[in-house]
Image (cartoon, rainbow, N blue to C red):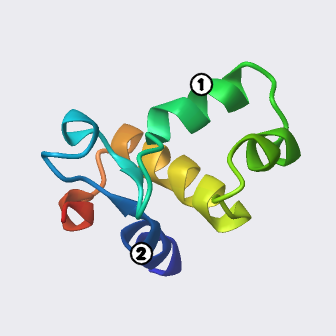
Amino acid sequence: MRSKMQVKSRIEIKPRVCNGKAVIKGTRIPVSVILDQIAGGESWADILNGYPELKEGDIRAALLYASALLDHSEVKEVHA
């Protein structure tokens, strides 16, 4: 339950923001960019240095969001 609330509070999808891609709430940073950087071997510290507006909880929420999608979990509540 906590992870679902964390995702909902930090991830948003709006049709006019980044073409409706999932982004970190209040930014134009797509979840996919964060995931790509982690997959490419970037550390959380490097990501946070590159995007000073992000917090660790934002990275965690991006990972939880991706996990929920892969699990076919209910994520439609994230949509704003």
Residue tagged by mark 2?
9
Image side of residue 50 versus residue 77, left or right? right
In which quadrant is the N terminus drawn? bottom left
Residues at marks 2 and 1, CA–CA distance in whole angstroms: 22 Å
Residue closest to the eye, 49 or 80? 49
Please state the horizontal and vertical placement of residue 30, each as a whole percent of the image: 43, 39
In which quadrant is the C terminus drawn? bottom left
Q: Residues within 10 Å of mark 1 (few under 14, many from 20)?
A: few
Image side of residue 28 versus residue 53, left or right? left
Q: Do tag 2 and tag 1 residues touch (Cβ < 8 Å)?
A: no
N-terminal-most mark, 2 or 1: 2
Image side of residue 1 versus residue 57, left or right? left
67 w.r.t. 53: above or below: above
Q: Residue at x 51, y 71 (%)?
A: 3
Number of numbered discs overlaid on the protein picture: 2
Image side of residue 19 versus residue 43, left or right? left
Q: Secondary structure at mark 1?
A: helix
Q: Secondary structure at mark 2?
A: helix
76 w.r.t. 17: above or below: below
Please state the horizontal and vertical placement of residue 13, each as a whole percent of the image: 24, 53
Q: Residue at x 42, y 71 (%)?
A: 4
Report the amino acid beneath label 2: Ser
Q: Residue at x 68, y 24 (%)?
A: 39
Q: Quadrant of residue 26?
A: bottom left
Please state the horizontal and vertical placement of residue 50, each as a whole percent of the image: 74, 40
Q: Which mark is residue 58?
A: none
Residue tagged by mark 1?
36
Report the amino acid beneath label 1: Asp
Q: Residue at x 75, y 41 (%)?
A: 47
Residue closest to the eye, 67 or 79? 79
Please state the horizontal and vertical placement of residue 7, each as a whole percent of the image: 44, 66
